[in-house]
Image (tube, coloured by chain):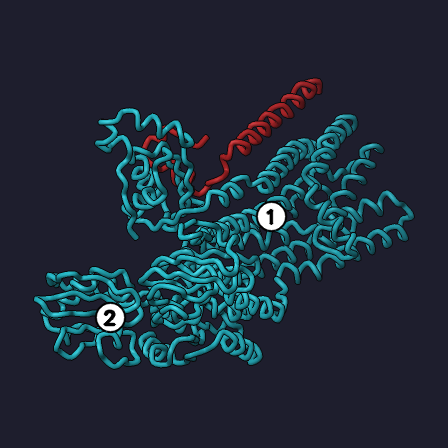
Amino acid sequence: MSVLSYLIPISLLLGGAGLLFFVFTVRTNQYDDLEGDARRILNSDYDDRPKS
Amino acid sequence: MTATMRPSISACPACIAAPGAEDIAQRDVPKEAKLAISVPGVHCGACISTLERALSAHPGVNSARVNLTLKRALVEADPYVSPEEIIGLINAAGYEAYELDAGTLAATSQDKAGRDLLMRLAVAGFASMNVMLLSVSVWSGADGATRDMFHWISAAIAFPTIAFSGQPFIKSAWSALQNKCLNMDVPIVLAISLALVTSLWETMLSGHHAYFDASLTLTFFLLTGRYLDYRTRAIARSAAQELAALEVPRAVRLEAGAERTVPVSELRVGDLILVRPGGRMPVDGEILEGFSEIDRSLITGETRPIFAEPGMIVSAGEVNLTGPLTLKATAVGQDTSLHRMADLVAIAESGRSRYTSLADAAAKLYAPGVHILAALAFVGWYLYSWDVRISLNIASAVLIITCPCALVLAVPAVTTAASGHLFKKGLLIKDATALERLAQADTVVFDKTGTLTAGTPEVRELDHLGTRDLMIALGLATVSLHPLSLALRGALEARGVKAAVLEGAREVPGYGAEGLWQGRQVRLGRAQWVGAKASGNTAAWLAVDGEPPLEITFSDRLRPGAQEAVTALQASDLEVIMMSGDSAGAVEALAQRLGIAQWVAEALPGDKAARIAQLHEEGKKVLMVGDGLNDTAALAAAHVSVSPASALDAARVASDIVLLGTDLSPLAEAIKVAGKATQRIRENFQVATVYNIIAVPLAIAGLCSPLIAALAMSTSSITVSLNALRLK
């Protein structure tokens, strides 16, 4: 069971990293136009100026 | 809609001659202008690329981004680029566009509450996933010290998470308790905190069951419901603010002969105000100078323009059509007749019986029921076992099982789906319960002017005029911007008529246009002015010197989709009534054209509201559709109300739903979608109830392990959300 002492911190760290990344996406307004983004991925134009 | 296209500075030949000009221009003004433009017509991926390409092609535009959710284009452009220019570009690409007030946009882009909620949701999601992982190991057989360690780690994650993510519920429950009442959040907070406390206790005593995962998933699902609800309303709110931002309230004041543009709020009684053709009267006042015609359709519903001359009293909200007018203000701001009329709304609003939404009704039944059930379970088990620990565990299991995840998701999931669907069709649902009320509507009352009709005239017939007369009429019509002459011009040009050559053609504000044709005087305008006897029609008269004048009659152009909307509503067995402040002749003609059997003409604003109140007493649920100030009281009095985006501010505020486009046809579909949505909400409540009926006896019997609680909760929430998605 000693393997747990590695695995649990690792899983918590990975989850925490995911959470921090999510916080970053929220802070940079990436959820403002979900509707538009869903359509944009089908767009053939190269989008060289993603919304900052 | 056309915009004046200015050549950009770098393209103008003068700049090449004076190379310094561009530098100076850039130094003096802010580097970049951010423009927000409302584009109600965008609806697909192709629209986005068409618009962005069209906007980016303009040399002054640095970046353009279309937001499909808000149906808005954000343009960063060089400071010399005017909003009109951008609007011209968008129009050229084939979309309607309106400029938005930058101040209003700044207020909506910083959506703090929404972000806050999203953050809490994310934290709850992260925590519940991790704790669930640990719980699954416990359920699959972790034992002894391992189980205790897992429980302790879960506790370490759960407590701070609930302290952060649970705040919206805790705050709302606390304020409810302070007001000595129960809302949905009281049992929620009780369930979550009781689950945490008993689980911690169990963990300390190295017990088998802990509900950390349940309290976290609960928080996650509840926050999901709350966020969906918030998002639907935020979109509606920002769109409603956009509509408000469309009207920039400014007026031109004459100060010692000089013109100055000032905000309407700064106007005082006695000020001299200049109203240009096409402008709206900012105040009540008396005309001092100038002749013109006035369109009062938004105030009274009359379509025919009124002749205006010095000495006449005008009221705020009327539109000046042909000549510039100088007014002396007699009442400003709150004292204008426009505002007094808006007061009627307040009266009607107070009379409207408060509608109890389905969710409120469910909460009223639910909250006390749950508390009683949990208390009974606790007392029963305590009497049976004389063990506080077991009884408390059972009670918290009952609270968790009954916790209204599905109930809380049931309504927002459906309204989000329905509002999103209707928003794409151009309907903005402003009020949370509007969909439910719309579903109940069985009678539809339409206003005429501006609602069923577009408010622009259309030539009825031209066949009684000879080719010569048609040519003269076109020659005269080209010199005026009066709505009738614009309509006439459009009709004549569509026929391929060429304009006659006229000498000295000019507009005589308030009367019409005149000129010389082969040395003979010709006039196009009001009946009295050309020497004819006025008839009851909306008409312009054409007079060639020495010949009897000819009448050209106009009718009101139908709003696009009006015919379809009326037909579809009648087909789905709704009673359609038309009420208008206009004259009987015009109302009857339109009623026959649209196939509306019941109509009321020459109705005063009070009459409309009274008639709706009377329909209510007959047990009818009235949907009122109107745009003018004379409709506001009726809009507020009706069970549910719709106004077009072109309506006056007061009318939009009073109505529950706003039609964003010019088309009226989505109305019939809206009622159908609303009906479906209400049905889905009811189904969702039934689903939630069925889950409770199965799981509650298990919980009371003490057979409900954390695994069963987690399963019941997740399945019911997911079923409810899937059912809501079926709406499309």
Tag 2 subunit: B
The answer for how far apart the CA atoms under marks 1 and 2 are is: 61 Å
Q: Which mark is residue B21?
A: none
Q: Colour of chain A?
A: red
Q: Is residue B286 left or right of residue B163?
A: left
User: Looking at the image, which is closer to me, B352 or B680?
Assistant: B352
Depicted B680 relative to depicted B597: above or below: above
Residue in the picture at 21% in, 61% down:
B506
Is disc 2 on the same chain as disc 1? Answer: yes
Q: Label 1 is placed on what type of residue?
A: Gly
Which chain does the cyan colour mark? B
Q: Position of residue B102 (x, y in %)?
A: 46, 42
Residue in the picture at 8% in, 66% down:
B518
Number of numbered discs overlaid on the protein picture = 2
How many neighbours does mark 1 have within 10 angstroms: few (below 14), some (14-19), or many (20 or more)? Answer: many
Q: Is residue B398 left or right of residue B534?
A: right
- The residue under label 1 is B225
- The residue under label 2 is B525
